[in-house]
Image (cartoon, rainbow, N blue to C red):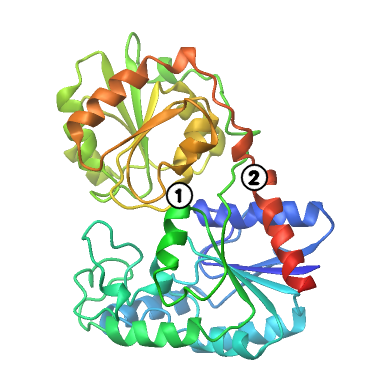
Amino acid sequence: MKILLINSVCGVGSTGRICSDIYDVATNTGHICKVAYGRGAAAKIPLSDTYRIGSDADVNIHALMSRITDRAGFYSKRATLKFIDWIKDYNPDVIHMHNIHGYYINIEVLFNYLSNADKKVIWTLHDCWTFTGHCCHFDYVGCNRWKDGCGKCTQKRTYPASYLADSSARNYADKKKLFTSVSAMTLVTPSKWLADLVGQSYLSNYDVKVIYNGIDTDVFKPTSSNFHKRHGLYNTKIVLGVASPWSERKGLGEFVKLSEKLSGDYTIVLVGVTEKQIKTLPKSFVCIKRTDSVIELAQIYSAADVFVNPTFEDNYPTVNVEALSCGTPLVTYSTGGSGECLALTKNSGEIVPKGNVTALVNVVMKNINRKETIKIDNAPFNKKTAYEEYLRAYEQLITK
């Protein structure tokens, strides 16, 4: 079976690592797989099995025009036409799309090809961009305009940002026409929460399958390190948060509120913060910039006593799964699919009402002393188990 994966990045970031993991599972079972991507450099996959769509200049022009016109996804035409020629030469049996936003591909050219090509198509949705006229998430502002056409977008300046035009109504209509034009397409979501939203959108006529994201449990497992010694963290309990990038939507401000209610017996460690953010955070915080080292991340997760994710909008955060797999209990707000991973392993954490800092403090203090007494099963998070489901989905499509 010949498989083509399409994503904004390859081998880096959460969706990029998901693609490289699917590639590994597919090629290790004898299939042919290639990854097409649009930004940065490919990682973790042989260059012979990758294809860069366009160039840095194409991405920059696409992003610039989107900031003026609010038409993200409707530029990079020449790069996409060239990519379509490459697809025809490769001639895959299955085309598996992931994030097609990110200023690198022309969705009109892509879907005009897909709607006429005799190809089986799977599309994994990692956010809500597919069925809105602009944004990737709308929970934070409580917007429901995506249900009836968008327009007068209240999030025009959020990614993919526009500083002039508001084309959300036009985008919505065009995306609806394009994205419903492919007959042989299966949608996948990494959470039941997102699957429910898809069922309320213009994509509701498509089959939707939930496949939870997997991770490398050979790396993300209880891991010893000198983390405490390196940072002078003696006789203190570590409350950990990880995100990239951090923002108020990701709950950065909630950690400040949390610190004000916790005693000096606790230390908050944040990973993924910028220099600018470090200057505004309490001096008591241990702040670590972004790291792409999964081994270092596993060491940090393992050193923590509790992992806290007070996000206000999210799908199925990989960081939650990584922390649990390292044996650290999770406390998260009841946001999107953020807490769904807790159902996969018993007695591993708790979900708190969104924005309720008092409840958050109580649950953090309750769970922080449980780490030494609980054993979290990381088997449900294994990437091989998770992504073999995609291979079965490919095979089912081909035999239809």
Please count the marks in the image: 2
**Residue 200 percent coordinates (x, y):** 39, 69
Q: In the rendered view, tell whether residue 42 sits above or below residue 298.
A: below
Give the image quarter of residue 290: top left
On screen, residue 396 versus residue 215, left or right, reads right
- The quarter in which the N terminus is drawn is bottom right
Q: CA distance from mark 1 to mark 2?
A: 15 Å
Secondary-structure class at tag 1: loop
Q: Nearer the viewer, residue 169 or 301?
A: 169
Q: In the rendered view, tell whether residue 24 sits above or below residue 143.
A: above
Whether label 1 touches label 2, CB < 8 Å: no
**Residue 399 percent coordinates (x, y):** 79, 71
**Residue 98 percent coordinates (x, y):** 54, 65
On screen, residue 165 versus residue 269, left or right, reads left
Question: Quick one: label 1 or label 2, which is nearer the N terminus?
Answer: 1
User: What amino acid type is highlighted by mark number 1?
Assistant: Tyr
User: What amino acid type is highlighted by mark number 2?
Assistant: Lys
Q: Report the disc number at residue 383.
A: 2
- The quarter in which the C terminus is drawn is bottom right
**Residue 343 percent coordinates (x, y):** 49, 37
Q: Nearer the viewer, residue 335 or 62?
A: 335
Q: Is residue 46 among the parts visible in the rendering? A: no
Q: Report the disc number at residue 316.
A: 1
Q: Residue at x 54, y 78 (%)?
A: 54
* Other-residue count near label 1 (Cα within 10 Å), few / some / many at <14 / 14–19 / ≥20: many
Give the image quarter of residue 129: bottom left
Q: Residue at x 46, y 29 (%)?
A: 301
